[in-house]
Image (cartoon, rainbow, N blue to C red):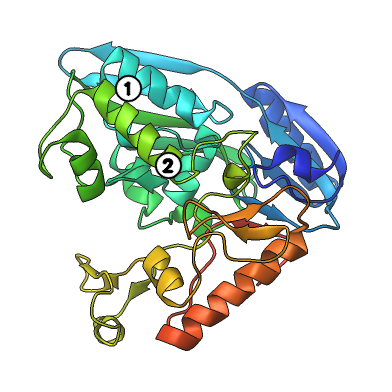
Amino acid sequence: MDLADLTTLRLGGPARSVLEVRTEAELVDAVRVVDEAGDPLLVVGGGSNLVVSDDGFDGTVVRVMTRGIAVDADACSGASITVQAGEPWDDVVARAVAEGWVGVEALSGIPGSTGATPVQNVGAYGQDVGQTVVTVRVFDRYERKVRSVHHSACDFSYRNSLFKKAAPRYVVLTVTFQLRLGDLGAPVAYAELARALGVEVGERAPLADVRAAVLALRGGKGMVLDAADHDTWSAGSFFTNPVLEAGAAERLPEGAPRFVQPDGTVKSSAAWLIQHAGFERGHGDGPARLSSKHTLALTNRGSATTEDLLHLAREIRDGVQERFGVELVPEPVLVGVSL
């Protein structure tokens, strides 16, 4: 099987072997067997955050297809939901909105599986999963046992976590979230979303309205999967927003976004830097191009190779570095390739 069939970029060569697992026990057993055999292992969920070599993967791909949500909810403590790693993330958000579980509504429309969300500390529109994750159950490949990692040990930060820093040590099995109960979403923390909802930042809006607004905003940027729309044949935002020391942020030109962080560093906007380095939407003259809707998405226009995509990524990274002295860091996991 080609990895192109398992990734949202629709890129990547063949895997030597693929194991599909549908229960937690099968997932743990598969990883143990592969590790004991000394075979290279690649764990794949929704494939929305992978850039795989055109040569493929010379090892075993374990495709996580586990499903299920266990719920413990009451009016006093809210809803504690434990989600299997293979459960599609947006299905979880849709159910949360329908059930009146508050805290993940702004994360609507994000592709991929639930097991990937704590690894990247997935976030959008002022929310991230680190705000609601209580426990992540993992298989520890080094100690060869199942462990529960509580929130305080997850080391969540912007698009980062213990699980990303220690990769490939941990394989996520389940994620437990603690969500409030209510009809209104969490206070809106992102100006663009607040404008779409017609509220002020810090105010609340009905859960269903927040989800609808987020899906509309993401759809307008090509960030909701659509097989007929090549702008969605991407890995989402290809580069993370750079977090700079204060001095480096001061050297950015007037008008560059600057968001001071609690530790004194300053987050800027990768999309702004890309556009102001001269890369407009749709940039590229080959089968890999910037999205026509959003400069942060690198897309496969239907016939691209992984090398085509990486050539474009290097051009953009180097252009931003030359123009602003800022090195953009890729967000997807690179398998068998590098920038």
Any part of residue 104 in sight: no
Q: Is residue 195 above or below residue 50?
A: above
Which mark, residue 72?
Answer: none
Q: Position of residue 112 (x, y in %)?
A: 55, 37
In front: label 1 or label 2: 2
Quadrant including the C terminus: bottom right
Question: Which three-letter amino acid code belongs to the residue tagged 1?
Answer: Ser
Quadrant including the N terminus: top right
Q: Secondary structure at mark 2?
A: helix
Q: Position of residue 161 (x, y in %)?
A: 43, 54
Q: Who is closer to the viewer here, 113 or 42?
A: 113
Which residue sits at x=47%, y=41%?
117
Q: Tell me if 17 is positioned left or right of 52 in this view.
A: right
- At label 2, counting other C-alpha atoms closer than 10 Å, the crowd grade (few under 14, some 14-19, many 20 or more) is few
Q: Who is closer to the viewer here, 234 or 175?
A: 234
Q: Is residue 167 above or below residue 4?
A: below
Q: CA distance from mark 1 to mark 2?
A: 33 Å
Residue at the spot of label 1: 80
Residue 325, quarter of the rendered image: bottom left
Residue at the spot of label 2: 220
Which residue sits at x=66%, y=24%?
25
Q: Who is closer to the viewer here, 105 or 78?
A: 105
Residue 313, quarter of the rendered image: bottom right
